[in-house]
Amino acid sequence: MRGEFSFIERFLSAFPRARVPLGPGDDCAVLPPYRGQMCVTTDAVVEDVHFTRAHFSPEDIGHKALAVNLSDLAAMGATPRWFVCAVALPRDFPGRELSRLARGMAALARAHRVALVGGNFTSARELSLTLTAAGELTRPALTRAGGRPGHRLYVSGTLGEARLGLNLLREGRRRGAALLRQRRPQPRVALGLLASRFASAAMDLSDGLAQDLGHLCEASGVGAEVELSHLPVSPAVRQALGLEGALQGGEDYELLLAVPPARVAAFERACARAGERVTAVGTLTRGRRRVLRDPQGRLIPPPPGFDHFRVRPPVD
Ligand SMILES: Nc1ncnc2c1ncn2[C@@H]1O[C@H](COP(=O)(O)OP(=O)(O)OP(=O)(O)O)[C@@H](O)[C@H]1O
Ligand SMILES: Cc1ncc(C[n+]2csc(CCOP(=O)(O)O)c2C)c(N)n1
Ligand SMILES: [Mg+2]
């Protein structure tokens, strides 16, 4: 039997029952009061924009849709609590693929102990998933606006892998670490929570460090100097994209953090203890100038990042 309600049942059956006053099934969910303030975000993944059905398994698509939302919560230092999921589905979408998509999403939800509390189904020409997620703060939110001149800039993990993964998928490759970074980004939730004890500002990197750094600088009213030679870039990415290319592609879903000098040593110790990889890549500066220092010591302007509405995107 096909139909909207069988799709809803199929989707929900991948998830455990949410432990909230009222979960999926009524006109709204009913949620308990939380102790801390709540962070709320929404983000969509759209067929042929964020994934292709040829290169992503249904599980990958479900995972990525939730991951990009959890990454926004991580960037605020919030602990994910619940999400709702609006599914737009082509009329001929196979039911068993919907189950697989739900299972991919449910596995990541379980890992982060975040509950699906509602959603929506509609028919559409392309597959898309639009999620709204909320997380609880135990400390003041880590915004983009708290950076000050002299604060050190850190990035988590490595940069450029997801863009390399996209290139490799387009070349027909099926396996490898970079492909996994493109198809199964891992939101840095634990690091965000840790960073909320030390950092003055944070954001997640979805559109490339070069462009996203600009948003943090603008919000904080500062400039920045980033050392290209300090960037955490694997040899494979360096060879395929170059250092500048690693800053451009986006979808790294790593965190960019500003840390006051007095907190740097304690922050680095806490990261090492927690097994979180972070790399110091530069400094916030007075004024508005954002520059990259290349390995020869020359100052160059940051390259553009991903933009959905640029007429002809220079990347991807
Ligand atoms: N349609 C909208 N209505 C209200 N606010 C919006 C809308 N679109 C974007 N914003 C706000 O503008 C800011 C920038 O949006 P953007 O989608 O670039 O978020 P981001 O976290 O930087 O990127 P990503 O979507 O990759 O997570 C966010 O604070 C977002 O809430
Ligand atoms: C099929 C396909 N084409 C292009 C890309 C690259 N891409 C899509 S969205 C985005 C930025 C983040 O999105 P948003 O700003 O919506 O959060 C990037 C780098 C991809 N992954 N798949
Ligand atoms: Mg974000």
Image (spheres, helix red, strand yellow):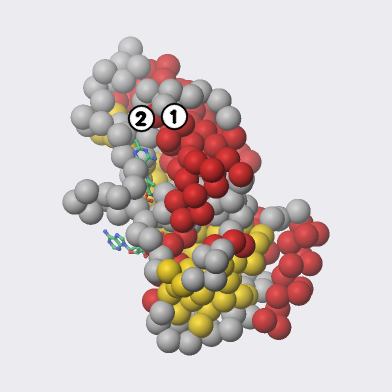
Where is the N terminus found, in terms of image quarters? top left
Mark 2 sits on what residue?
A: 52
Q: Is residue 310 above or below residue 64?
A: below
Q: Secondary structure at mark 1?
A: helix
Q: Position of residue 6 (x, y in %)?
A: 36, 21
Q: Is residue 171 above or below residue 270?
A: above
Disc 1 residue type? Leu
Q: Please give the name of the residue rendered at 63% of the width and 41% of the height, measured from the top-left corner.
A: 111
Query: Which residue extends farthest front?
Result: 296
Separation of disc 2 and disc 1 at Cα?
10 Å
Q: Is mark 1 within 8 Å of ligand 2?
A: no
Q: Please give the name of the residue rendered at 47% of the width and 60% of the height, measured from the top-left corner.
A: 209
Which label was assigned to residue 169? Answer: 1
Taking the image as shown, residue 300 lies to the left or right of residue 312, namely right
Q: Please give the name of the residue rendered at 47% of the width and 45% of the height, measured from the top-left corner.
A: 241
Depth order, front residue of 314/255: 314
Q: Quadrant of residue 189?
A: bottom right
- In this rendering, does residue 206 appear at all? no
Q: Quadrant of residue 178?
A: top right
Please report contact status of discs 2 and 1: CB closer than 8 Å, yes or no.
yes
Q: Closer to the camera: disc 2 or disc 1?
A: 1
Q: Position of residue 264 (x, y in %)?
A: 70, 75
Depth order, front residue of 215/13: 215
Where is the C terminus found, in terms of image quarters? top left
What number of labels is visible? 2
Of the residues under marks 2 and 1, which one precedes in the sequence?
2
Depth order, front residue of 116/236: 236
Q: Position of residue 59 (x, y in %)?
A: 49, 28
Disc 2 residue type? Thr
Q: Is mark 2 within 8 Å of ligand 2?
A: yes
Q: Residues within 10 Å of mark 2 (few under 14, many from 20)?
A: some
